[in-house]
Amino acid sequence: PGRITACVIDLGVHRLSALTPDLHADFAGCQVILVLPSALQCRAGLLPALQSDAQLSPSFFDAPGAQLALQPRLPATPPPIFPPVTLMFISPHKLGLVYDKLSQGAADRALTLFCATARDVLAQAGVYECQEFEGAMMVASHTPRAAAEAALRLQLRLLVSNQWPPCPAMRSSRAVMMSATRRESW
């Protein structure tokens, strides 16, 4: 009584130059969170898309089955039947070896490049990043085929990337990072 519960929805990271005109060149993005009273959560999917310069990371609404999660239910009705989702796990192979062979800064740059490359490929493939920790990512897709295609695209991008730093030590880390994705069975 007297309390209102809230629904918190991640709208992703966006570049919003209108809010940060002075910082735009150095400002990577802004995490946008929508907070609604729980009674209004079913209306969240009806809101217009955020007008930003660019969406830099996926939002809750990009996840498979997200719209069903917000639909209202009467107390006696069964929960919604969500569509099948394929989970895939990717991570830099032998990341510890990369950190052992390179300086901390070079290894951090290699990991940052791996994560940026993976996120770019996943976004292009329509695959949703659920979470990431130290380069290990859990991602969801609508089908096993989409997951496999995203994994192959990532392998190809890592193999042909010209963004790896030119120093000799990084070449050895590139060899390790090129074989960086492991597809777990689903």
Image: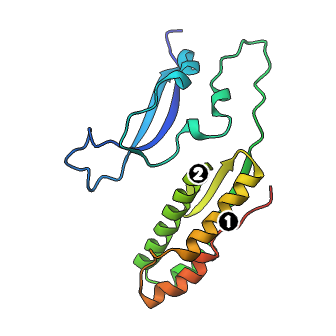
Is 93 left or right of 163, judged from the image as shown? Answer: right
Residue ID at (57%, 56%) = 132
Give the secondary structure at mark 1: helix
Location of mark 2 (residue): 131
Return the x and y of residue 151 as percentages of the image width and height.
Answer: 67, 62
Residue denoted by label 1: 152
Asked if residue 104 lies left or right of residue 79, the reply is left
- Is 72 rendered above or below residue 166? above
Image coords of residue 114 (percent x, y): 52, 68
60 horizontally vs 22: left or right: right
Residue at image coords 58%, 55%? 122
Amino acid type shown at disc 2: Gln
Q: Which mark is residue 62?
A: none
Q: Amino acid at mark 1?
A: Leu
In the picture, residue 92 is in which quadrant?
bottom right
The quadrant of the rendering that contains the C terminus is: bottom right
Which dot, 1 or 2, sits closer to the camera? Answer: 1
